[in-house]
Amino acid sequence: MLSKALMIKSNLACVIVGRVFGNRIGNRVGNQTGKRRSRSACAGFTLIELAIVLVVIGLLLGGILKGQELIESARARNLISQLDSIKAAYFTFQDKYGALPGDYPGTLARSNLSGIENDSIGGNSDGVVRDTPQARESLLVWVHLSHANLISGHYRASGSQPDPASEWPRNPYGATLQLQYDAQFAGSGGGARLNLKTGSQVPARILAEIDRKIDDGRANSGQFRFSAYGGGGGPPSESRCYDPQNGYWRAAENEANCGAAALF
């Protein structure tokens, strides 16, 4: 029975190979010649050769999937490193100058930070980083951090409003980051907290991996949560990025446009 089954499988493989290669050969040298060569090729096509072909295909597919997994892990590590470096710069500035970047008053910024052109390049010094009609503190924060030599980049402002043509921090997917005191994150209940947003266009699978590495793995609790902040790429959809019932990121669906906020 076993030998008969193996023979059937071998014959089936030969028929498939014969149809593909026999037809191609027949197109070149005539149908009858192609059929004879097809039968000859099938006669020499063994189960061992079939197994080798399947193994090679399996190795190729496995390599492609593993490569994709390594790329995603590298991007997750890159984003974690980016968030950590900005947090470190923020706390260093606070410790060194006794004030918050972005909220730092312009008179002190001009006196203590190199390259600040006038007294208007500063915040209102109310103790939080948030935008007001007078100053975009969430953008001035990058100006103050860079002029304090705590982050790299070409950040500048001609007044209390940063230059829109200037460079701003972006995530690996091109959307801008934001550091601000607000409630634009899942589970906030309307209560504002200082947070650093990743920006949009980050796949749900990447955010799920980051959340597992640095927090509790849920998008609506802990210190790393979903955020609908767009950052130039369109606001992410809460229901498409994570399940509100259990809080887990929808990594299997892997929505391409998601974002998160790291709470301070």
Image (cartoon, rainbow, N blue to C red):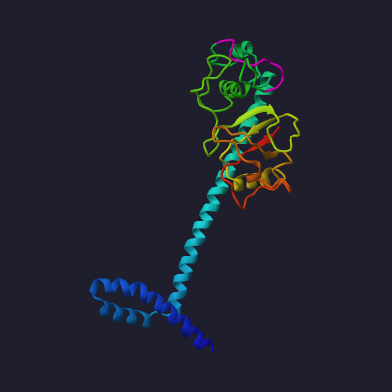
Q: Main secondary structure of the magenta part?
A: loop
Q: Where is residue 24 in the image (x, y as percent from the top left)?
A: 30, 71
User: Where, by quadrant of the figure, is residue 21 drawn?
Assistant: bottom left
Q: Is residue 144 above or below residue 23?
A: above
Quadrant holding the N terminus: bottom right
- Residue located 74% across and 38% down the image: 187
Where residue 174 sits: x, y (%)?
52, 36
Q: Nearer the viewer, residue 2 or 156?
A: 2
Q: Which residue lies furthest to the left in this view?
A: 29
Seen in the picture, residue 151 relative to 249 is either above or below; the reply is above
At 59% from the left and 23% from the top, the residue drawn is: 139
Number of labels in the image equals: 0
Q: Position of residue 109 (x, y in %)?
A: 61, 14
Magenta region, residue range? 118-129
Q: In which quarter of the image is residue 128?
A: top right
82 and 225: which one is in front? 225
| The furthest residue to the bottom | 1
Location of residue 209 in the rendering, given as x and y in whole percent from the top left corner: 63, 47
Quadrant location, the C terminus? top right
Residue 180 belongs to magenta span: no
> Does 121 appear in magenta?
yes
Check the image and report above or below for 11 versus 244: below
Relative to 32, is 137 on the left or the right?
right
Residue at image x 26%, y 79%?
Answer: 33
